[in-house]
Image (cartoon, rainbow, N blue to C red):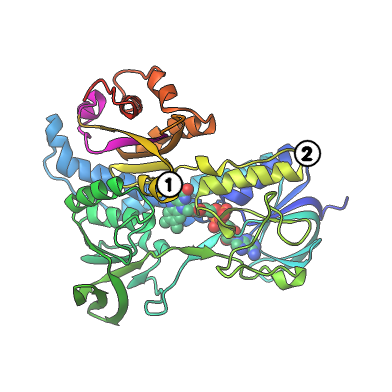
Amino acid sequence: MSELDFDVTVIGGGPGGYVAAIRAAQLGLKVACIESRGTLGGTCLNVGCIPSKALLQSSEALYQAQHKLHEHGVKVKEVTFDLSQMMKRKDDIVKKLTGGVEFLLKKNKISYFKGLGSFVDNKRIKIKSSDGKETEIVTKKTIIATGSEPIELSMAPFDEKQVLSSTGALALDKVPAHLVVIGGGVIGLELGSVWARLGAKVTVIEAAPHILPMMDKDVVRTMKKVLAVEGMEFHEGTKFTNLSKSASGIRVFIESESGKQELSCDKVLVAVGRRAFTKGLNLDAIGLTLEKNGKIKIDEHFQTSVPGVYAIGDVVDGPMLAHKAEEEGVACAEIIGGKAGHVNYVAIPNVVYTWPEVASIGLTEQEAQAKGVEVKIGKFPFAPNGRAMAMGEAEGFVKLLADKRTDKLLGAHIVGPSASELIAELAIAFEYSASAEDIARSVHAHPTLAEAIKEAALAVDKRSLHS
Ligand SMILES: Cc1cc2nc3c(=O)[nH]c(=O)nc-3n(C[C@H](O)[C@H](O)[C@H](O)COP(=O)(O)OP(=O)(O)OC[C@H]3O[C@@H](n4cnc5c(N)ncnc54)[C@H](O)[C@@H]3O)c2cc1C
């Protein structure tokens, strides 16, 4: 095998791609990973999960100091903040993590090519680096893990100065006076929260009847109330129709059942979703056509219509989440390596990292109703939970849905402190096809937030102890 011959080539070094590369290398395969960004880690580490969580954490610290610490008897004379330090902290975290991924590739003896990968045919891939240099490699199998990009609206093209994508909204050097967020999904609410806590007026426009349209309606009701306290305003069931920019600001035009309206602001964040990214791959060379929504179609083994070419992560169907991409990366590498790779799609948690956080897995109550699945529902609030009270974070609840006949858990929804961590217990429960009774009978340490999960499980059979 020549130096430029590989068993597996992964195009894209995001959470799907780099994880697939590591797993394939662990299985003894000779692996190449191609990434055009200049740093590894993809959207997630560079301009997604990690920088957004860094800013959420910093802005939460500010919010705590301004609004919560006094309840603990902690007196802070004057609370101010330094946005450039917050941004530097975020950039430092990103640098550390992306560098860490590069180290992992080296450690696993994966050849990392910096440049844009494109197919010559289904066994040869050309890599064009930023200085124009071209390298061609030969590969037995290829995994496409090229991820996604923000959807741009024709009426509001990104200029990253006034009209921002999520990437622009993670790198502002000044707090906007008024930020209008188009799209009340996860990214819109997380980034809206950051800027609201830092002092911006934030108005969210959502075309669907509610923000977080895919979430359980109980969750949505609570989140609207909580985010409003943080200073966010919502226009639901409202369409963004156009905007006009001038040096002094932006006029945003919206329309709902109650008529047309105009908002004035200084920044607009367009967060209406993401679409699969396949530009530059030269898919024609291998005869691979895209689905109508721009995604790559795969079979149950992650293989595309072209033998030996696989695809994973945001570029294929399913929730656009880093952990989904990672699990697909592992499963795909295992299948290529001759093992039985598998992803359990019903057990993929979904988190919104606002405060309180939202975390859910499985069916919502509305989905269960629509599917005609009969469920028993157990709900327990954080208000009587000792640990939540001690933390001063008693907002929210745990809601569990169990099959009426078998008691098997079908859905779990948490609004509350550290919901993103609490959902892990329920992800394991889903993985083991646990019943509500299994959770109710498991010993939960006291005092912990997780006791609210146990109480919700007890409430499924109307025997919660602390309500
Ligand atoms: C603001 C924001 C916050 C988010 N927060 C979360 C979160 O909290 N939790 C979560 O689970 N998900 C979150 N996501 C989503 C998450 O980032 C994605 O689901 C995840 O990154 C997808 O992984 P991937 O490997 O499929 O693709 P990506 O991470 O998009 O990686 C694909 C990589 O391929 C590279 N590439 C593309 N074409 C080529 C080519 N031809 N040659 C070489 N390289 C190429 C790209 O440069 C990119 O680096 C967030 C996203 C955003 C934007």
Q: For the point 76% across and 68% down, which residue is it?
A: 286
Magenta residues span: 384-403
Q: Earlier in the sequence, mark 2 or mark 1?
A: 2
Choose top left, top right, bottom left or bottom right for residue 130.
Answer: bottom right
How many C-alpha atoms fall within 10 Å of the one at disc 1: few (<14), some, or many (≥20)? few
Numbered tag placed on residue 28 in the rendering: 2
Q: Is mark 2 within 8 Å of ligand 1?
A: no
Q: Callout 2: helix, strand or loop?
A: loop
How many C-alpha atoms fall within 10 Å of the one at disc 2: few (<14), some, or many (≥20)? few
Q: Quadrant of the C terminus?
A: top left
**Residue 238 against residue 28 in the figure, above or below:** below
Left or right of 288: which side holds 209?
left
Choose top left, top right, bottom left or bottom right for residue 235.
Answer: bottom left
Q: For the point 48% across and 28% down, which residue is it?
A: 434
Instruction: Judge by depth and name the residue closer to the eye, 135 or 318.
Output: 318
Point out residue 204 in the picture as x, y percentages from the top left corner: 27, 63
Q: Callout 1: helix, strand or loop?
A: loop
Disc 2 versus disc 1: nearer the observer: 1
Give yes or no for residue 465 being in the magenta stretch: no
The residue carrying mark 1 is 372
Instruction: Judge by depth and name the residue closer to the eye, 192 or 132.
Output: 192
Q: Amino acid type of disc 1?
A: Gly
Left or right of 127: which side holds 104?
left
Q: Residues at badges 2 and 1 in contact (C-beta under 8 Å)?
A: no
Numbered tag placed on residue 361 in the rendering: none
**Looking at the image, can residue 39 be seen?**
no
Point out residue 88 in the picture as x, y percentages from the top left corner: 38, 52
Point out residue 255 in the picture as x, y percentages from the top left corner: 25, 75
Q: Amino acid type of disc 2?
A: Gly
Real-space Cα separation, disc 2 to disc 1, in angstroms: 47 Å
Point out residue 106 in the picture as x, y percentages from the top left corner: 67, 43
Give yes or no for residue 394 being in the magenta stretch: yes
